[in-house]
Image (tube, rainbow, N blue to C red):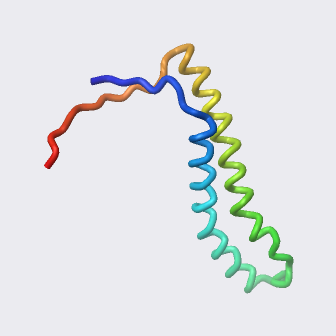
Amino acid sequence: MKHQITHISPIHIAKIFAILYFAISLPFLIFMEVSMLFSPLHEAPRRFLIAMPIVYGLCGFVVTFVGAILYNFIASKIGGIEFTTREVEEK
């Protein structure tokens, strides 16, 4: 059975991706903190380390929001992403 995604809710998908981008940035935060310990500038302010996950989350939100709006516009003109599904038996 073929289905087509013709509309994506920009706010909902943007919230999900903001959380994902925030979570993905956290391991990099640890790496950057460790690398700063061995840097000649190890006394540099660490404010950007705290801001990094927040900025990543905001960027993820904005980019995904705009992308969803563009997708909805394009899908309304030429059709959305098609995918095929099939029913399976529960085990």
Residue 42 versus residue 49 in the image, above or below: below
Q: Residue 68 in the image: x percent, y percent?
A: 60, 33
Residue at point 63% right, 27% down? 70
Q: Residue 63 in the image: x percent, y percent?
A: 67, 41
Residue 52's image quarter? bottom right
- Left or right: 50 as drawn, with respect to 67: right
Residue 14's image quarter? top right
Residue 6 versus residue 53 in the image, above or below: above
Q: Nearer the viewer, residue 87 or 36?
A: 87
Q: Residue 6 in the image: x percent, y percent?
A: 49, 23
Residue at point 67% right, 46% down? 61
Q: How many marks?
A: 0
Q: Nearer the viewer, residue 86 or 90?
A: 90
Residue at point 63% right, 38% down? 11
Looking at the figure, which quarter contains the N terminus? top left
- Left or right: 9 as drawn, with respect to 4: right
Residue at point 75% right, 70% down? 49
Residue 37 versus residue 57 in the image, above or below: below
Residue 34's image quarter? bottom right
Q: Nearer the viewer, residue 19 or 70?
A: 19
